[in-house]
Image (spheres, rainbow, N blue to C red):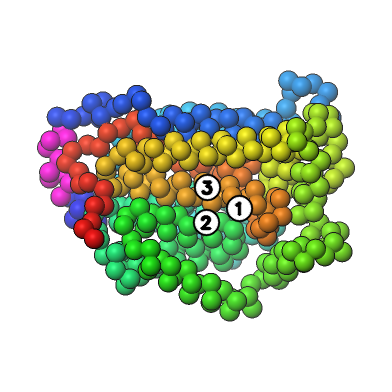
Amino acid sequence: MILDDLAFMVKGTTSARFGVLDSLRALTPAWLCLFSAACLSLLGVYAIDLAERPEAQDILALSAPAMKQAIIVSGAIAMTLLVAVPHYRFSVYLALPAMLLMLALLVFLLLPMVPSSIVSPRNGTRGWINLNFFLFQPSEIAKIAYVLLIARYLRYRDKHRKFWGLVPLGLITAIPVGLITIQPDLGTAALFIPSLFAMLLAAGARIRHLAIIVVVAALAAPASYPMLRPHQKQRLVAMWRQIEGDTTTARDINFQSYAAQTLTGAGGLTGTSDAQTRSLVRYNRLPEAHNDMIFAVIVSRFGMLGGLAVAGLYLLWMIGAAGSAAMTRDPFARLVVVGVSAFIATQAIINIGMTIGIFPIVGITLPFVSYGGSSIIACWLMTALVLSVGVHRPLPPYRNSFEFDQ
C-alpha cells in the first residue's frame, strides 16, 4: 500500500496542473445525501423532545437532550461541509493512521486498570470514553476508518477475486470486530460484515466465494451460542418467544419489544397529536425511547405514513450515494461510498426491524435520528465522504474502477 502511494506521488506531476479547484463539479447526486441527512437529523431532534418532555408547555423550547442533540447536529453539519471541501484523495493517507488510532482506543476501553471516571460501563458495555463534556464512542468512528482502510487495500488489487485472497481481508476485519464484540457490543460489530461484503462486490469479488462464506458462517452460528453472555442469549430467546406468539413475555424479557410495537401501532395511518404522543410515550414507559427505539416515537406521532417517509429519506440517501459511486471512476472513491452506504443502510434496516418486532433487539441506533453524539458525528462524516466524492472529479493519474475480463 505504501509503495502504491509513493508511485502515485511520483506520477502526480500531472495533478499539479489539475488542482483541487479544477476538479469541482456542482451537479452531483451527493446533494441528495446532504438533504436527506438534514431532514432526518431535524426530525430526530423533534422526536427526542417528544420522548423526553411529557408536556410541551412551550413549543419553541426543547428538552435538555433535544437541545444537546441540536447543538451536535449543527456542529456536525458545519464539520461535514469543511471535510467535503478537500479532495477525497487525501483520505487515502489518513486510512492507516486513523485505523491504528481507533484500534488503540478500542483496546484502551478494555483495560481493567482504566478509572471508572474515564470508562464507565453503560448497560454492561465498555464502549464510551468520558471526556466530561462528551461521551465518545470509538466504535462509531472505527466504522469510517475501517472503510477507508479496506478501500485503500482493495483499490489496486485483484487477489480478492480468488477465494484464498479473501483471507487477508477477513483477518483485517476480525481485529476491530473482535475488540468491539468483547465490549460487548454485538450489534455494532455485526455491521462490519455487510460493509465488507458490499465493498468486495463493488471490487469485483466472485459471488460464489462470498456465498460459500455466508453458508459456512450460518452453519457455524449455532456453535457460538454457548459463548454468548446471558443477556445476549436472553435476547435470542425473547425473539423466538415472540415469533411463537408467546405474549406471556410481554411484561418480562419482551417488554421493550412489545412496548415499541404498542407505541408504533398507536400511530395508525396518520399519527396522533403532539400532546397525545408525549402522553403515550410517558405512560407506555418504553425503554430507550429517545435512542434505540426512537422510530416507534416517530410512527406514533406521524403514523405509518410518517414511518414510510423516514424509510423514503433513507432510500433518498442511498440513491444519492449510489449515483455518486457510479459517477466516479476512481476505485478508492467508489469503494468508500459503497462501504459507508452499507453501514448506513444495514443500521437503519436493523433498527427499524427490531422496533417493529421482526429482528431481535441488539442495541443499534437509527442513523442521523437517535440521540447520541458519536453516532451523529459518524453518520455526518460518512455523508461528508460521499459529498467529497460527488463534488470532486478524480485527480489524474488514476486507474479505472475494477474492470476485469471474465
Q: Residue at x 61, y 53 (%)?
A: 350
Q: Give the prevailing secondary structure in the magenta stretch.
A: helix
Q: Between tags 3 and 2, which lies in front?
A: 3
Identify the image quadrant of residue 228: bottom right
Image coords of residue 140 (percent x, y): 52, 49
Residue annotated with mark 1: 350
406 to the left or right of 325: left
- Residue neighbourhood size for the residue with mark 2, other residues' Cα within 10 Å, grouped as few (<14), some (14–19), many (≥20): many
Asked if labels 2 and 1 touch by Cβ distance under 8 angstroms, the answer is yes
Instruction: Establish if 371 lies above or below 194.
Output: above
Q: Between tags 1 and 2, which lies in front?
A: 1
Residue annotated with mark 2: 191
Q: How many marks?
A: 3
Q: Residue at x 57, y 37 (%)?
A: 312
187 to the left or right of 169: right
Question: What's under tag 1, amino acid-wise?
Answer: Ile
Question: What's under tag 2, amino acid-wise?
Answer: Leu
**Tag on residue 299?**
none
Residue annotated with mark 3: 345
Image coords of residue 185 (percent x, y): 60, 60
Q: Secondary structure at mark 1?
A: helix
Question: What's under tag 3, amino acid-wise?
Answer: Ala
Q: Residue at x 56, y 66 (%)?
A: 182
Q: CA distance from mark 1 to mark 2?
A: 10 Å
